[in-house]
Amino acid sequence: MNAINEVIDGYNLTIESVSAEATQVGLDTGKYALIGGGLFKNEEREELYLFPEEHTGVSTIEIYKRADDDSIQTLDDLVGVTVHPVTPNGGIFNLLTSYNEENPDNQIDIQLGEAGNFAQRFQALHDGVSDAVVMPSNLGADDMITDLELNVSTTNEPVQVNPTYFVLAQDQEALKEKLDEAIAQLKEDGTLAELSKKLYGENMFDYELTEQ
């Protein structure tokens, strides 16, 4: 946001740090003109809000596995192994369900239940309780795995890459136009790539998007 403020024309955007629930309420009630937080497009959101033309990040869905297990690299490889439980109707549940619908002869056994926190999921992998955990990438996950000395790593490539956006209230067409210009400039001059490397250790914009 600070980088956007340096180049956006006619606006000075003030940042507030609040819960995800509060951002949604604030956007709906007019308290906020736009919100961030790594939001992706879906049909419901596109009916209610404005999305910039340019995305400002990506959210990756990863398969975590035991580091010495080279047999798991893709969703296809989850057939016949123990996948850590997922929450019903959550994004990971929907991803795995969609896979099963598209592959009727090659079914992943989807176990429903509480997934636990990140440390518990990774420990279950290390201990052999689960063979794979499917979940969004999380800043700090690698450090947690190292600190706990766990035999856990991700597969070579994420299974899904979703672009993430700022989201604007419907009456913010003028701001959307200026925001599009600012984001495009920051992409072109390499600022967003440098910020991504600084924050995540890699240029997230190098990923090929699997969802638009």
Image (tube, rainbow, N blue to C red):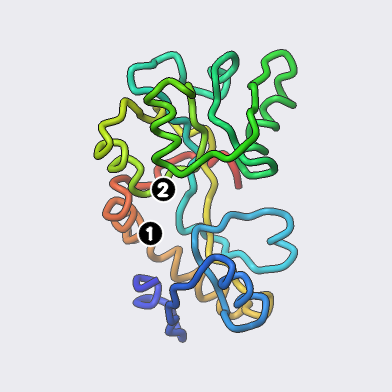
Q: Secondary structure at mark 2?
A: helix
> Eyeballing the image, is 125 above or below 92?
above
Q: Residue at x 55, y 16 (%)?
A: 81
Res. 168 in view: yes
Alpha carbons under labels 1 and 2: distance apart: 12 Å
Q: Amino acid at mark 1?
A: Glu
Q: Residue at x 64, y 21 (%)?
A: 108
Query: Along the line of sight, which residue is nearer the eye, 73 or 178?
Result: 73
Q: Quadrant of residue 109?
A: top right
Instruction: Single out the mark in the foreground, 1 or 2.
Output: 2
Q: Residue at x 31, y 55 (%)?
A: 199
Going by the image, does 56 lie left or right of 141? Answer: right
Q: Amino acid at mark 2?
A: Phe
- The residue pinned by badge 2 equals 205
Going by the image, does 160 lie left or right of 191? Answer: right
- The residue pinned by badge 1 equals 188
**Where is residue 203 shown, x and y percent of the image?**
34, 47
> Eyeballing the image, is 113 above or below 73?
below
Q: Of label 1 and label 2, which has the lower sequence position?
A: 1
Q: Quadrant of the N terminus?
A: bottom left
**Where is residue 85 shown, x and y percent of the image?**
58, 32
**Where is residue 66 shown, x and y percent of the image?**
38, 23
